[in-house]
Amino acid sequence: MSLQINQTEKPLYIKVNESDNVATIVNSKGLPKGTVFPSGLELQEYIPQGHKVSLKNFEKGDKIIRYGEIIGAASSPIFQGTWVKESYVTLPDPPILEKLPLATKVSAPLPPLEGYTFEGYKNANGSVGTKNILGITTSVQCVVGVLDYAVKKIKTELLPSYPNVDDVVALTHNYGCGVAINAPDAIIPIRTLQNLSIHPNFGGEVLVVGLGCEKLLPERLSPQEISGNITRLQDQAGFKQMLATIIEMAEEKLIKLNSRTRVTCPLSDLTVGLQCGGSDAFSGVTANPAVGYAADLLVKAGATVLFSEVTEVRDAIHLLTPRTINKEVGQSLIKEMNWYDQYLKRGEADRSANPSPGNKKGGLVNVVEKALGSIAKAGTTPIVEVLSPGEKPTKKGLIYAATPASDFVCGTLQLASGMNMHIFTTGRGTPYGLAMAPVLKVSTRSSLTEQWHDLIDLDAGRIAQGEATIEEVGWELFHLIIEIASGHKKTWSDYWGLHNDLCLFNPAPLT
């Protein structure tokens, strides 16, 4: 990406690509009518920060270009120097999946990046944790009240005696019964729960709490299928015995987990998930490109990098299929796009349901513009594998893990895919966090970092101000990932204990 910043002390705008005919206002309070840029452009009205200014006169139907790509057409004449509002931009048709080029622009392998390691927890199966957590999973929502009560007691009465254990996390959800357990799409929530149960940060210590009459049998969630890892509440003589049983089983696991210590591991043991939330017009020019640069560094160092969010990829898919390592991977990517197209169609929805009101307030006019900014997180390396929702990778490198765009569902599915570090970019701001893995938040705007100084971990807004380059922030993020993965530093969400609930993706019917 060639990022051109038209900069004086004031005013500032960003034109991403030479062919763009709109630019983005940088100044935190926006700019008033009459503002003149060094290029000679004069604003004909007030334009808020993050919103677009027209660099030319548009006739109705003229193509509007940002990132060097068409984001829509003018619905009416737009004069140079005016605010290009959402209502002025018609949504173009999405790329036709059957006509996409496959594996036609596969970049050469990047030179290896050697000499970088992190301190992690080695597991018997070869995976590595960035945290040391007791995870307790559930086979049905019915048991959640009892388990939550037990976890509170475990945290207050037992956990202080096991200082090497970071946390106790209950994997609660709304699945397990009253569902079409054998429906084809039921594989998604079931696979997700199975893979969550064996997350690297749980150290291989599986504990399942079931009820006893649910459709999702607890044995399906315990890979070892050992009865000692499962308790069923219907087998217990009342609430107090339920608690005593859960606590006794938990302490057995805590003893084992407490003996674990961090050891030096190669960066190839990291699985890093990338995600946007509360995006704005700066996401695609500051935070996401910096994350993309860091993603390239991670891939060069041998790590696994997951990017996701189907509806925030679909309209830029023509830029991704050429990057697939071969045609088979390209076809897998198209298959996931098509599956989601049909999923939305069944629900009588379409891609225009994205972006959110906050995204629009931050300057994004439609999902096309949002998608073009979103894929910047994926850097430049070839896409080596495509995962269906909740699947685990079989390769190292850049991987597309298909998920909905919902923050909570995406995060849950990336955890199921083995993510042990989460990078989350935001322009509008969100206190989102996950208990199972560190969530490192990167802001798109310096003003957000200043406002949320104790919630944002890294400020990429300096790129828009001309105070740092994409490469500099990318390297800074790379080093910060290693520091946090090693336990040398906490993210703000972990510092405050801000952790969102897991949220399963279940496209199958309820009964």
Image (cartoon, rainbow, N blue to C red):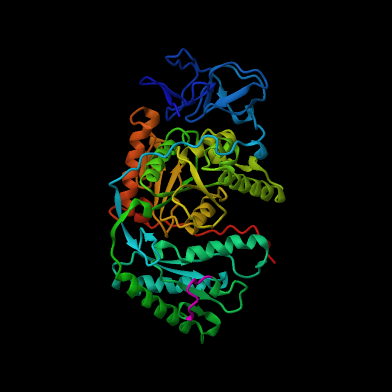
* Residue at position x 59%, y 16% in the image: 57
Instruction: State the residue lying farthest toward the bottom.
Output: 237
Pinpoint residue 322: horizontal percent, then vertical percent. Answer: 55, 37
- The answer to whether residue 204 is left or right of residue 403 is left
* Residue at position x 44%, y 43% in the image: 425
* Residue at position x 57%, y 50% in the image: 404
Examine the image and state in which quarter residue 160 appears: bottom left
What main secondary structure does the magenta stretch of the protein show? loop
- In the rendered view, would you say 477 is above or below 139? above
Residue 326 visible somewhere in the drawing: yes
Examine the image and state in which quarter residue 64 appears: top right
Q: Nearer the viewer, residue 90 or 215?
A: 215
- In the rendered view, would you say 271 is above or below 360? below
Q: Nearer the viewer, residue 117 or 192?
A: 117
- The answer to whether residue 114 is left or right of residue 420 is left
Pinpoint residue 284: horizontal percent, then vertical percent. Answer: 48, 35
- Does 190 lie within the magenta span? no
- In the rendered view, would you say 124 is above or below 364? below
- In the rendered view, would you say 405 is above or below 152? above
* Residue at position x 54%, y 58% in the image: 503
Pinpoint residue 386: horizontal percent, then vertical percent. Answer: 54, 49
Part of the protein shown in magenta: 221-227
Residue 427 visible somewhere in the drawing: no
Q: Nearer the viewer, residue 342 or 400?
A: 400
Q: Quadrant of the C terminus?
A: bottom right
